[in-house]
Amino acid sequence: MGKENFSRTKACATKTLYAVMKEMSRRGGSMPAKELYPFVNENVELTEWEKEPAGKMKYIRWTNSFQFYSIDYQKAGFIVKKNGTWYITPEGEKVLKKSPEDVMNLARAAYIEWKKLRDIEVGADDEPTDETAEKDNSMNLDLLESDAREGIKRYIVSKSPYEFQDLVAALLRAMGYHTPFVAPKGKDGGIDIIAYLDPLGAQTPRIKVQVKHKPDTAIGASEVRALSGVLKAGDIALFVTSGTYSADARNAASGNDKFIRLIDGDEFIEMWQEYYDKMSDDDKNMLPLKRISFLGNNE
């Protein structure tokens, strides 16, 4: 890459990453990876050069520089990428008081220091790491993980409410619970699943589960409080949605005198992946996964 192009690439990443960090902060700290590119396209002034495809893979220049330098911001501790979502850290919030150029310089310095320490640990007899190749691998993995997560989400969205309810019951069984009651089709009676620690339900706590298949909706506080109202002595509650919860709903759960655990769509996918190997074949087939291994490191 020529000196002029390198300078333009860095300048492009400086403004796009700063804009995304500001937006994550405005949204309360996070942003789905699938919304990053549309946000930048609609809200950041990009030059014609930045919007052109380039390189062997013909990636759009600004998206390539954005992903490439985002790794510096990760190493600086300004952002975290996890399961198809980007998060701004407390350190990231603090540096937003600085200029975009200052944030980029801090991120670059952090990456260079991290790489220097890593190359020392690798040892003089080993081949030194190449920044471009290393970042390309990381970028490709990020994109693959994001695509995989979106594929799982689309699959869940395509399910009926009762099919999603069955997925929740399967997850509970994989976690070691017994599910003697899973609500049949018909009028919603409020409790969709009852889960026990033992086959007879003699041990406490007994779990009453409310399931809502609303992938595009945030569950409100009133629904959380309604679940609290059906709990008796020895009960705890689990509320699972394929969507999200409002801030008021989370406050209603955390401030309740009864134990109510909220699981949103993203966490449900994480838990399904974590407990997948412990499921029966029939339960796996409701949301089948295929594991792929990549060469990586312990960073």
Image (cartoon, rainbow, N blue to C red):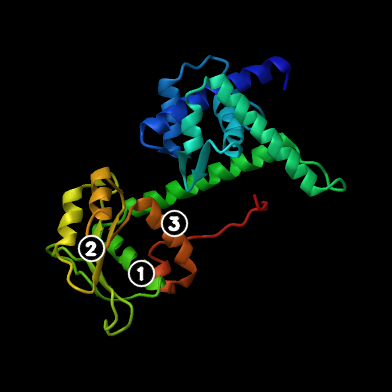
Query: Which amino acid type is marked by label 2?
Result: Lys
Q: The residue tagged with tag 1: helix, strand or loop? A: helix
* Residue 172 marker: 1
Q: Dot 3: within a 10 Å radius of its alpha carbon, few (fewer than 14), some, or many (20 or more) residues?
A: few
Q: Give the Cα distance between marks 3 and 1.
A: 13 Å
Q: The residue tagged with tag 2: helix, strand or loop? A: loop
Residue 202, given in percent of the width and then of the height, sits at 27, 84
* Residue 219 marker: none
Q: Dot 1: within a 10 Å radius of its alpha carbon, few (fewer than 14), some, or many (20 or more) residues?
A: many
Please give left or right for residue 39 compared with residue 113 in the image.
Answer: left
Classify residue 224 by image quadrant.
Answer: bottom left
Query: Which amino acid type is marked by label 1?
Result: Leu
Q: Nearer the viewer, mark 3 or mark 2?
A: 2
> Cβ–Cβ below 8 Å for labels 3 and 1?
no
Which residue is label 3 attached to?
270
Residue 263, given in percent of the width and then of the height, sits at 33, 56
N-terminal of the pair, mark 2 or mark 1, is: 1
> Cβ–Cβ below 8 Å for labels 2 and 1?
no
Q: Nearer the viewer, residue 111 or 82?
A: 111
Q: Nearer the viewer, residue 3 or 226?
A: 226
Which residue is label 2 attached to?
258
Q: Residue at x 33, y 82 (%)?
A: 198
N-terminal of the pair, mark 3 or mark 2, is: 2
